[in-house]
Amino acid sequence: MPTPSVLLGLNPLILSSVLLLLVYAALIADTINRAIVSLLGACAMIVSGILTQDMATQSIDANTIGLLTGMMILVSISRRSGLFQYLAIVSARRAKASPWGILLILQITTAVLSALLDNVTTVLLVVPVTLAITRALDVPAYPFLFSEIFASNIGGTATLIGDPPNILIGSLADLSFNAFVIHLTPIILVIMAVQALMIHLLWGRDMHATAEARARIMSLKAADEIQDPVLLKQSIGVIGLVIIGFIFARPLKLEPGTIAMLGATVLMFLDNWAHHSEKQAENVHKTFTDVEWITIFFFIGLFITVHGVEVGGLLHLLAEKLVAATGGDLAKTGFAILWASAILSAIIDNIPFVATMIPLVKDMAPALGGAAQIEPLWWCLSLGACLGGNGTLIGASANLTVAGIAEREGIRFSFWTYSKLAFPLMLVSLAISHLYVWLRYF
């Protein structure tokens, strides 16, 4: 489909690049909601003539939108059963109410849930329980929240559905759920172990709680958190089947977005089976209200904005420059993507960055031997963007989510206090990733 006439005869490469920079600047400033920013960018791409409305509509990746929406619905319904609150109390009791033990187990719990759900949803579930536990133990909450940010982004890197950048990469680069597990989970286990050790050396070994405080934690009954036992069983069953569906998506010839939406629909059906028609409408409305529509529309606007830049020619130009700078060497290109993705994702939100990088990496394929040969570059991009998001407070959505909850509870979470410790720890995880991709792929 031909590009329409650009407003006032302006150069589409320059105009689309300026619009992208304005979108990024607004996202970094964080004074206007990010969904509004991305939709303004999308509208500007159409109104300026860089894209037609049909081109903009076709650029929206329905698989990504379906996957995000479906998983949000699954989590919304499962949360009402008390499943996640139950897991948090069990974790605390398993650690015998020891502060350093709870610190470790909550990190592991956060990482595992982030791999199976998504990291933003996970911190929304784990952080309120964490604050309740730290108040009962009378220990500082900051180390727990800091470590959960890191655990959520690290754990989310391990699977297709764990982190929004991975959802984008998997959908737009046609990579399966199994591919992410095979290529990323092994190194994520190593990074998580190193991260937990560093957190323990920084805070865990010096944490202590009184006998009375520990007794209060041990008196909590996890079973009391179960609000709906039937819904709990249904939620576990459906989520389990959805994950199995992700694993066998290729043989089933189904996309992850379809599987997630099918699971969400089935769980909504089961949740409403026992309700009368009047109650069903209210119940379904509540479920849809829990969907993070800001995130959904942020992605929609982002797809259109990035496609405008792609049509304008900037990404092809950058791909040529990067290939020329690395001499067409796959390993050098991979390392450049790994480190550049990490540093830039720490400065700007990793979601718009990855959305911009995906078509750029695709444009490198002809110069590097074809689409099959550049697969290691996708793992470099995922590791760099997801782990780099830990570097600053604005690097990933989970970071800002935790900081927002903490500040409402009176816990100071400043940009520089977080970043001066987080950035060096992030570099450690990147160094481990560098060694991994060198040994495995190059």
Image (cartoon, helix red, strand yellow):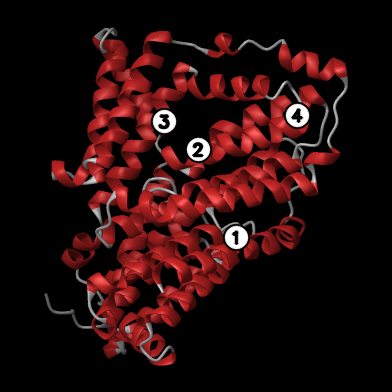
Which residue type does callout 2 highlight?
Val
Badge 1, how many Cα within 10 Å: few under 14, some, many 20+? Answer: many
Which of the two marks, 1 or 4, is nearer to us in this view? 1
Residue at image coords 74%, 58%: 421
Crowding around mark 4 (Cα neighbors within 10 Å: few <14, some 14 to 19, many 20+) is: many
The answer to whether residue 117 is seen in the rendering is no
Q: Of circles 4 and 2, which is in front?
A: 2
Q: Which mark is residue 429?
A: 1
- Contact between marks 4 and 3 (CB within 8 A): the answer is no
Mark 4 or 3 closer to N-term?
Answer: 3
CA gap, disc 1 to disc 2?
18 Å
Using the image, tell me which numbered label, if any, was put on residue 134: 4
Q: Residue furthest right?
A: 210
Q: Earlier in the sequence, mark 1 or mark 4?
A: 4
Disc 3 designates what residue? 75
**In what element is the residue under mark 2?**
helix
Q: Nearer the viewer, mark 2 or mark 3?
A: 2
Tell me the crowding category of disc 3: few under 14, some 14 to 19, or many 20 or more residues within 10 angstroms, Cα based.
many
Residue depicted at 58% across the width and 37% down the height: 108
Residue 370 pos. (x, y %): 22, 77
